[in-house]
Amino acid sequence: MFDELDREIFAAGEQIFKVGEAGDCAYLIETGAVEIFIMDQGVERLVSSMGKDEMFGEIALIDHQPRTATVRAVEKTVLVPVRRKLVEGLLEKSDPILRHLLLVILERFRGKQSNAAKSVPKSVPDTETSRAQAVHRSNLKGEAAQKLSLAHGITRALARDEFELYYQPICNLADSSVSGFEALIRWHHPTDGVIPPMDFLWFAEQTGLIRELGLWTLERACRDWPTLRQYSDYRFPFVSVNLSPTQLTCESLVDDVKGIIARHNMPAAELKLELTETVMIEHPEMALRILDRLVELGSSLALDDYGTGHSGLEHLQRYPVGTLKIDRAFIDPMMNSAQSLEIVRSSIDLAHSLGMNVVAEGVETGMARKKLLELGCDFGQGWHFGKPATLQDLAIRYAKT
C-alpha cells in the first residue's frame, strides 16, 4: 500500500508534465482524470483521456527518453507515482530476454512516433549518462542473445541426442561395495565440448525446459538400469535421479514417472528420486501431495544437499524422505573442524532416529570414509569410490575389479 507521501495531487487544468521533459516516473490514477496531448505540425492535439486505475508516462520511464506527450489534469486528480528506481529494480530481477524485448518494442514505438514528434524540442542527454545507457543496452542485448542461443541449444540437444548420463557410484561404507548410482547429466555440445550441468541446468530451470530434461534423464536412467544393476551386490540396489523444483510443481509428474518405469520394466523400489528443500518451502502443499504419490508407486525419496539450505526438522518430519544426503560442504572440513564433525554426527543420528539412511557426499579419502563409518553413516559418494563415468566406462572399470 502507498502512504500519503506517495501521492501527488493536481488541480483541474494543471500540467503534470509536458512533451520534451525528462521522464523519471510513471503515474497511476487513483482518482480523477487526465488528458494527453501531442504536437501535430506545431499544433497541440488531444489524443487520449484516461481515468481511475489507468497508468500513463511509462514509456519515458523505461527507456530514459524525453516525454512524448503533454498531460494535464481534467479535474482534481490524485496520482500515485511509480518511480524509475523501483522499475529498474524490478527489471534487473527479470529475465534479460524479456528486458531486451521490452526495449526493442519501445524503440520501435519511438520510431513510429518520430513523424508526429518532429516539432518536439530535442534534449541533449548528458554524455556520460548516454554512454552508460548505451553500454547497459549492449550488455543486455548480449545477455539476451546468449540466453536465446542457450534455449535453442538445449532444444536442439534434446532432438539430436547430445545429452548423456554419467553415473557416480554410491557405496556401502562398511566394505566400499557399490550400492547404487546417481545419474548426472552432461551435454556434448557440437562445438563447445562437454558442458557440465551447472552451466545450463539453472537456465533450463528458469525457462521450464527442465521438465523435458528431467523426463529425458529419468527415461535414460531407467533404460540403463539393467546394465548398472550388474555392478551392485547390494540387497536393495538403486539408481538416483534428481528432480527439480519446477518438476515438483507439475501434477503430471507422477503419471510421467509411472509411464517411464512401466516402459522399461523398472522395479519402482529400485528408483530413488532426489530433491532439494527449495520446493518444500515454495510449494509445500503441492510438494507433499506429489511426493506422497511417488512413494505410493514404490519409489523412495532422498533429500539432497542437507545442511546448506533451509534444513529443518519440519521438512524431515512432514515429507516421506527415506534418505538424507549430507552435503560435501560439511564432509570436506570434517577431519579438521570440530564444528563440522559435530554437524555430521548429529545429522546422522537425527536421520537414523527418523528411520532414514544416510549418504555422505564428497568422500575423497580413505580417512574420511573411516571417520564416517565410525559415526554410523551408511553410504558414501565421492572420488574415493569413483568419479562419474559413462555406461561404457563403467563397464571397463568394473570388468577390472
Image (cartoon, rainbow, N blue to C red):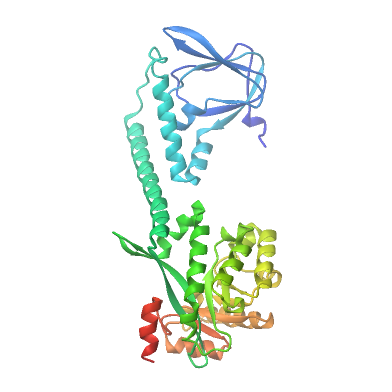
Direction left: furthest residue: 191
* Left or right, residue 376 beside residue 289: left
Q: Residue at x 51, y 63 (%)?
A: 214
Q: Position of residue 184 (x, y in %)?
A: 45, 70
The front one of 258 and 82 is: 258
User: To which quarter of the image does residue 12 belong?
Assistant: top right
* Left or right, residue 398 beside residue 360: left
Q: Is residue 284 visible in the rendered structure shown here?
A: yes
* Left or right, residue 393 beside residue 368: left
Residue 231, relative to residue 290: is it above or below? below
The front one of 368 and 204 is: 204
Residue 357, relative to residue 321: is it above or below? below
Q: Position of residue 206 (x, y in %)?
A: 50, 53
The front one of 356 and 191 is: 191
Point out the image quarter for the C terminus: bottom left
Residue 78, relative to residue 388: is it above or below? above
Q: Residue at x 41, y 21 (%)?
A: 112
Q: Position of residue 345 (x, y in %)?
A: 58, 83
Q: Residue at x 66, y 34 (%)?
A: 2
